[in-house]
Image (cartoon, rainbow, N blue to C red):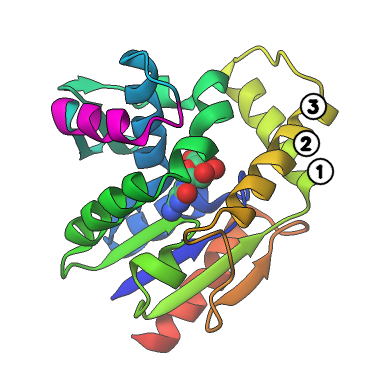
Amino acid sequence: MQVAIDGPASAGKSTVAKIVANKLSFVYIDTGAMYRACTLIARDHDLEYGNEKGILAAIDEDGIKLEPGEKGQKVIVAGKDVSLEIRTPEITAHVSEVSALPGVRAKMVDLQRQLAGSTNVIMDGRDIGTTVLPKADVKIFLVASARSRAERRMLDWQEKGIEAKQSLEEIEADISKRDYLDSHREISPLKKADDAIEIDSTHMTIDQVVDAILTEIKKKQ
Ligand code: C5P
């Protein structure tokens, strides 16, 4: 069984995907983390974020691996756990530029399909239902208003003890900018697959979203 969860930034995809994966003992794959790892590699090799050739060579040199971790999935670059480093504002600000490079996408999509293999998998991203796993059994398109996504992001930082250096308005503007870039790139832009079920989580709790997804999966089991 393959479950694809796509949607804009900070819609809660990874939170609900992890819970669903745990409940059903499915493998969880966070594809955003892979594009973040590519962005980190570009930075660490002092490459311009648009330097496709350089970034592809650096990815080959360092290698990106996903390993199961206590909190879901660990991202390993050049043998080092970079799971936290890929979430910094600096990487977040540049990831849409790196993820728009066709060669980088081709490499990551290959890796994602290999990782999915023939196991029960739940994968979250932007193009899973449209491109990576077009034959996924269940496709969810998870959306929420930009304001509520910004509020959740801020709450998340507070809970983790991270000092918010931006106002709510600034966080919302950053989220909207990333959505715009991800939806308007040439190759596999963020888009609802024709056969995806849209869930608007603006006024839903995490548990309600999880239940809605589990209901869709049960229909196909
Ligand atoms: O999901 P997350 O916000 O961590 O994704 C970071 C970025 O990676 C997105 O803004 C997007 O540019 C890129 N991405 C993508 N395709 C995916 C997953 C993420 O282009 N399947």
The residue type indicated by label 1 comes to Arg
| Camera-side residue of 159 and 192 | 192
The location of residue 190, given as percent across then percent down, is 56, 59
**Is the CB–ligand 1 distance for label 3 below 8 Å?**
no
Task: Report if the CB atoms under discs 3 and 2 are less than 8 Å apart.
Answer: yes
Q: Is residue 185 above or below residue 139?
A: above
Query: Which kind of residue does numbered mark 3 sit on?
Result: Glu
- Kindly identify the residue that appears in the image at 43 percent across and 77 percent down: 138
Q: Residue at x 32, y 47 (%)?
A: 103
- Front residue of 128/39: it is 39
Residue topped by disc 2: 172
In this image, 54 relative to 80: left or right? right
Residue 147 image label: 1
- Residue type at mark 2: give it: Glu
The residue lying at 74 percent from left, 30 percent from top is 171
Residue 212 at x, y percent in the picture: 57, 72
Residue 91 % position (x, y): 49, 24
Q: Are marks 2 and 1 in contact (CB under 8 Å)?
A: yes
- The quadrant in which the N terminus is found is bottom left
Q: Secondary structure under badge 2?
A: helix
